[in-house]
Structures are given as C-alpha cells and as structure tokens.
C-alpha cells in the first residue's frame, strides 16, 4: 500500500488546475505580549515582525505549487497595496494571475491576525481583523470573469472552485462554471462555503464538505461514520454528483461515489492549527485526480497532506517531499523491519536520495542483553539508518558450533525489530557478511573493538568505526582514498559476547 502511494505522489507531474475562488491575503503580526494595558484589561502586543501568506483560494494555489501543479487563477482583488502583495505571492508560487480582475470599489479581502509570542517562542492568536466586502459582484464583473474562464478552460486539466462565501459564487455564475467545465470534459472539484446553499453546486464532479457543512446541507447531523454515509448518499443524489468526500477531522474521511462508498481513516495527530486544512485537501485532491488517480487513492493522499498541515501554525503548504516522508515513516512503523536483500536495497535507495547516512553492523545477537542494547545505540548515533546483518541459524552453527544458536533466527530478528535503534534487518547464511555489505553499500561499518586486531570484513569497502565503552582515544588512518576511523579505548573491552 505505502509503496504504491509513494510512487503515485512522486509521479503526480505538473497538472494544470483552473482555480476559481475567493482570493485572500493572510497577514500575521507577531509580537511579545508581556503585560496588560493600563488603559483596559487587554494585552499589549510589542510588534516584532509581520508575515504575509496567500489565503483562501490563494492558499490552494500555493498548495498546488508545493505539489508541483500549475495554477491558473480566476477571481477578484481590489486596487490596493494588499492586492499587489497577494499577486506577488502568487507569482512567486508560479501561478498564472492574469485571471484576477481588479475592482476599485472592493478591497482585497484581508485577514490580519495578531499573534502573541509566549516566552518569545510559542505563538498564540490574540485577535483577527477582517477587511472585506462580501456582497455579490455586479453583472459587468461576472461577465468579464466568465469570458476569462472560457478563454482559460482549454488550458486546464481540472477545475477547482474554492468558495469562502465572499460574494463571488452567485448561483447563476457558479452553475455556469460547472456546466462549461463538464461540457469540456473537465472534472469540477468544489470546496463549499459554510452554510452555503449547496444547490448551486449541482452537477459538479466532487464536493468536499467538512462534518458541519455536510450536516447542514444534508439535514442529517453527522456524529458517526454511519451518519456520514447517510449524508453523503443524500448529497450525491440531491446534487447529481460523481462523488462526495466528507472530511471527518480525526476520523479521516468518508467517500461516496455512484458505485462505491468507503470510510478512509487517518492517523490521529496533535492538532496545532486547522487554518488552511481544507485548502490542502482540495489541492491534493486536484493534483491527484488530474494525474489520473482514482478517488479512493486521492483521498488517502489528501488525508496524509491534511494531517501534516494541521500540525503547522496558520495557513501553510505541504510539499511532495513531506508527504513522501510521512508515508515512508508510516511504512517503517507498520511494516516488518526484516527485509530480503533485494527489498532492502530498494528501501536504501530512497534513504540515500534524501541524504540519509546508512550504518551497517552485523552479528549473531543470540541472547540479547544490555551490551547489545548499548552497542546498537552507539550504531544509531553514527548515522540515520541502521541496517543489522543477522547471521542465520546455519551461519551461527558454522561459527559457534552445533549447539548454537540458543534462539532461532526468526525469534532473534523479532526481538531486534522491537528496538528503535534498528531500522532494518537482513539475514545472511554466509559465515561473514561481505556479500551483504557489497549490496548494502553502507556509509559506515561498525564492529566491536575486539575486531580491530582480527580484521573487519568489508573494511576495504566502507569507513568503519570500532566502539568501546570508554571512548578516550581516536585513531584515524587511510586505506586507499577513503578515510578509515577507529574509535578505541586504552581500557580492554571484550565485546565478543555482543557479536
């Protein structure tokens, strides 16, 4: 499962998304809130810095850019300094902003948040000030936007409507956008506005209401997954949709299509700030579906992306690399650490691509004890990923005699898998790990100090380290053109039992 998702995320390409919506500017004013005003019982904010981020549909555009997609923007801004700032941010994300219409009698919608820094570190929002005009546009502006939409539609792979209920999506205009896109064979994805009349979304491909929005629109209060299933069935029939995805916060999402339905759970995470979570969901769905991914897989990807976003402060983007890293982490935690050599080399290729250092050690590890634990802890400190080459039962017998091992290879591997300091285990039959080392190609080899005189197998292939309990002497020497480093001690330590 994880391998497939990782491959899909890494090959989304650069789909073109026509994004119509309410484009906002988010402003964060950070400061220290150290005392209460003598004029009124309110905190005084001593301003330290200001930060400008794209918000609303602009946030979706930034999220799409982080996923490698190209965004064609359609919406309105004012003729003011905030419009210039917002357009600069969108240009920086690689978005096409030629579809943003300037309106002189409407301000650029701006949300200004004042954030106090507790102990100069932890941000806490104190106040939000909104500047906006949210009544419907006049007919002249709708006509201009519609003309721009028709012009840009052929360039797009998919269409997104991000409704923040700021006056853009009047019913007739919204239905025209949907009809034109569907006639052109384009999927239309909609993130609906809270308390909106969902009738205007009729005929879209997909809507993504959250629990509250879906409850209001369906008339069915959603408390459980079964409630979500009922609400989704009502919405898909009532609005003639291809699919409904109801996001259920910590419970994941519920997907309903005309032919299938499924609850797709997510991993419960520590939520820091839900701002922008819906934007990330819409962006990841759009990028995935435009790349030809099915609805279920697209929801699995957006679940991961949304989970990453809520752990960040404010509206924030989620990159392909972050999603892949999260999937890799889940794979390592849920999957077996015990790999065949072929499976292992594939995994290590990914780690190397992310500049992670590979450490290799090996041994019998027959009866696990404190010495083993400390030794493997030392290995972990030398790099990022520890690969443990484990002698098979056959190999142990050749080395230690017919009465060994005491524990069979599967039991030994299972116990070692429980250690956080071990990332992967590969079992080998040969008396020494040379062939395994050649295939693993570690950055660092680690062996017990007693092997300094015996000769370390594989030393000619990689830098190696010999640990000891008291590390008070470091010897550096060269073999060929590669530095070899041995950490030794002037106190004798017999680590044969470790190996």
Image: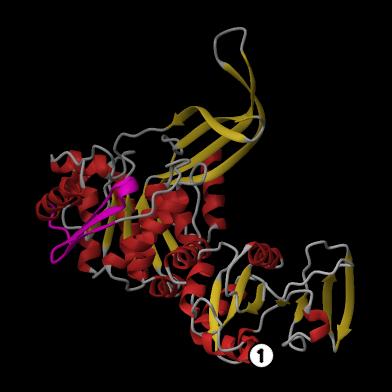
Residue at image point 40% right, 67% down? 16
Residue 310 horizontal/vertical position (percent):
45, 46
- Name the image quarter holding the C terminus: bottom right
Q: Is residue 337 visible?
A: no
Number of callouts: 1
Q: Does the magenta stretch include residue 50?
A: no
Identity of the residue furthest to the top in this view: 39
**Residue receiving disc 1:** 434
The reply to whether residue 220 is visible in this rendering is yes
**Quadrant for the N terminus in the image:** bottom left
Whole-percent x, y for residue 429 in the image: 55, 90
Residue 261 lies within the magenta run: yes
Is residue 145 rendered to the left or right of residue 430?
left
- Residue 259's place in the image compared with 353, above or below, is above
Q: In which quarter of the image is residue 424?
A: bottom right
Residue 497's x, y, as percent? 68, 73
Along the line of sight, which residue is nearer the eye, 341 or 182?
341
Q: What stretch is highlighted in magenta?
A: 239-264
């Amino acid at each position: 499962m994880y391998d497939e998702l990782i491959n899909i995320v890494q090959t989304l390409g650069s789909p073109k998304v026509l994004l119509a919506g309410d484009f906002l500017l988010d402003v964060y004013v950070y400061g220290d809130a150290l005392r209460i005003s003598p004029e009124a019982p309110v905190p005084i904010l001593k301003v330290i810095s200001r930060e400008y981020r794209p918000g609303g549909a602009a946030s979706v555009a930034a999220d799409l850019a982080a996923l490698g997609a190209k965004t064609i923007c359609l919406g309105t801004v004012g003729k003011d300094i905030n419009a210039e700032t917002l357009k600069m941010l969108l240009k920086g994300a690689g978005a096409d902003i030629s579809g943003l219409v300037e309106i002189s009698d409407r301000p650029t919608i701006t949300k200004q948040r004042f954030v106090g820094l507790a102990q100069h570190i932890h941000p806490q929002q104190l106040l939000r000030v909104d500047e906006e005009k949210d009544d419907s546009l006049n007919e002249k502006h709708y006509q201009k936007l519609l003309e721009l939409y028709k012009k840009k539609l052929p360039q797009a792979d998919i269409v997104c409507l991000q409704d923040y209920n700021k006056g853009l999506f009047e019913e007739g205009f919204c239905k025209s956008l949907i009809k034109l896109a569907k006639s052109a064979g384009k999927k239309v994805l909609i993130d609906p506005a809270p308390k909106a009349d969902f009738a205007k979304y009729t005929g879209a491909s997909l809507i993504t209401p959250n629990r509250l929005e879906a409850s209001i629109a369906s008339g069915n209060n959603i408390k459980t997954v079964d409630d979500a299933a009922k609400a989704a069935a009502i919405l898909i029939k009532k609005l003639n949709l291809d699919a409904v995805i109801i996001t259920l916060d910590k419970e994941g999402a519920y997907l309903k299509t005309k032919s299938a339905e499924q609850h797709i759970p997510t991993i419960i995470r520590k939520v820091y700030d839900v701002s922008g979570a819906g934007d990330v969901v819409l962006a990841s769905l759009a990028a995935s579906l435009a790349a030809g991914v099915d609805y279920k897989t697209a929801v699995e990807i957006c679940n991961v992306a949304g989970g990453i976003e809520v752990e960040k402060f404010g509206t924030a983007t989620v990159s392909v690399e972050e999603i892949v890293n999260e999937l890799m982490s889940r794979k390592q935690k849920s999957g077996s650490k015990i790999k065949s050599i072929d499976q292992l080399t594939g995994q290590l290729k990914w780690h190397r691509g992310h500049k992670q250092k590979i450490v290799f050690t090996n041994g019998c590890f027959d009866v696990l004890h404190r010495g083993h634990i400390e030794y493997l802890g030392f290995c972990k400190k030398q790099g990022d990923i520890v690969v443990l080459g484990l002698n098979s039962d056959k190999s142990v017998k050749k080395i230690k005699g017919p009465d060994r091992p005491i524990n069979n290879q599967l039991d030994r591997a299972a116990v070692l898998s429980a250690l956080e300091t071990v990332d992967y285990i590969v079992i080998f039959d040969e008396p020494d790990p040379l062939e395994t080392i050649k295939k693993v190609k570690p950055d660092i080899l680690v062996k017990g100090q007693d092997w300094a005189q015996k000769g370390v197998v594989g030393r000619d292939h990689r830098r190696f380290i010999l640990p000891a309990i008291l590390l008070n002497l470091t010897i550096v020497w060269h073999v060929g053109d590669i530095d070899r480093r041995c950490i030794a001690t002037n106190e004798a330590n017999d680590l044969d039992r470790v190996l």
